[in-house]
Every structure is written in C-alpha cells, then in structure tokens.
Amino acid sequence: MVIVFARAPVAGRAKTRLAARLGEDRAARLAARLTANAVRTALASRCGPVELHATSPHRLLLALARALKVPLRTQRGRDLGERMERATRVALRARRSVILIGADCPALAPGDLRCAARLLSGGADAVLAPAEDGGYALIAVRRPAGFLFSDMPWGGERVYRETVSRLARAAWRWRALRTLWDVDGPQDLDRLAARVTLLRPSGGGYR
C-alpha cells in the first residue's frame, strides 16, 4: 500500500517560502500539481492500493481524488509525526507493509517505490529515501514504528540522521534508497523549471 501525505493547497498556507517568487495563489496551485504528480507516481509504481492523506479536504484535492480514483483521507493527529504514525499503523492492520511518501519530491520515481517494496519483501524492516535537505522523501515499514515519528525535529536538517539513529538503536534492519531533492525554497524552482508540466498553470489546479 502507498500513502501520499499532502498539505491542502490553501493560498497563504501552502508553499509559503515560494510565494515571494510565485505569489500565494501560484504557490498553492503548484502545491496541488506536486500532489497530483506524487499520486500518479504512486499509482504507476503498482505497489498496491494508493490513498491520498491531506490536512483538509480541499476542493482541488477532492477533484484530484475523483479524477485519479483514489480515496482522500483527512490526516489525524496533533502534529506531523502523530499523523504519520497513525496513518502507517492503520494501514498495517490490513496490509503487510506500507510506503509513505510526501508530495514535495518530483524526483521520486515509480521505480523507487518498487525498490522499497522489494527491500521490505526481502527482509528489511524499514526503507528510507533521503532528501538533500536532511529529511526524507519516502519511508516504508512493515511493522508499526511509532518511535520513528514521535518527538522528531520535523522540518529541520536532522530528520534523516535522527531516524537512522533510532533505527540502529532499535536494531531494525533498514535500507536506504538514492538521495533525492524536493521543492522547498525558491532555489528549487530552477530545477523544477525543467519539469514544465508542474510549473505550467492549469485551470483545474492539478493537471
């Protein structure tokens, strides 16, 4: 199973660091298109059912979920870690493993998800795709992993290192995928410009 975690594309609240260059409305629309790209990547991986988990049921995400025929769930929890822990725990009640990806990494490919699934099937307890900014773009587990999500310095450059440290202390078998880049600040727009379908305005906000 693959879960795509996304923030609702609300102008003034989504991709705020990009708003200085794009404006609040364009930054929010870009967030919606990045989310659509992430869902398509998850579907193309064929790693099982795909769900979109958002901070709120925004109209663009509702339209996206209908268009791509995926369930839209509302994230539950007091902070990001609690929401991720809950989503993975619930998924593992019905599935042998779960892959969770964010919506900010257009470099993530279907093959990365398939590789994570193979590693889990081969005996790894967890798989991570490190990001250049010190976080990670993908986490995959085959058993509940609350210790990986609680009291984590989310948004900082120590997230990946701290996660790896916790995996080592817990004696979990884990593997790392290739390092990826995500869209976080204005400097990332130049790399994103090569992906014209993501920067190009669209009436639906996600196509």
Image: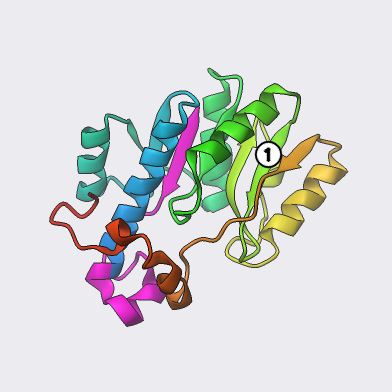
**Image quadrant in which you'd find residue 152:** bottom right
Amino acid at circle 1 = Val
How many residues crowd mark 1 within 10 Å: few (<14), some (14–19), many (20+)? many
Q: Residue at x 35, y 64 (%)?
A: 14
Residue 11 as seen in the image, left or right of residue 105:
left
- Residue 18 visible? The answer is yes
Examine the rendered structure and indicate whether residue 30 appears above or below residue 47: below
Does the stretch in magenta take in 45? no
Does the stretch in magenta take in 22? yes
- Residue 53 visible? The answer is no
Examine the rendered structure and indicate whether residue 190 appears above or below residue 32: below
Front residue of 183 and 162: 183
**Disc 1 designates what residue?**
127
In the picture as drawn, the residue positioned furthest to the bottom comes out as 20
Front residue of 178 and 104: 178
Residue 199 as seen in the image, left or right of residue 53:
left
Front residue of 174 and 74: 174
Residue 159 at x, y percent in the picture: 67, 59
- Identify the secondary structure beneath mark 1: strand
Numbered range of the magenta stretch: 1-26
Q: Residue at x 16, y 51 (%)?
A: 204
Residue 173 as seen in the image, left or right of residue 30:
right
Q: Residue at x 40, y 32 (%)?
A: 43
Residue 50 at x, y percent in the picture: 41, 30
> How many numbered callouts?
1
Residue 191 at x, y percent in the picture: 45, 68
**Image quadrant in which you'd find residue 39:** top left
Q: Residue at x 38, y 74 (%)?
A: 18
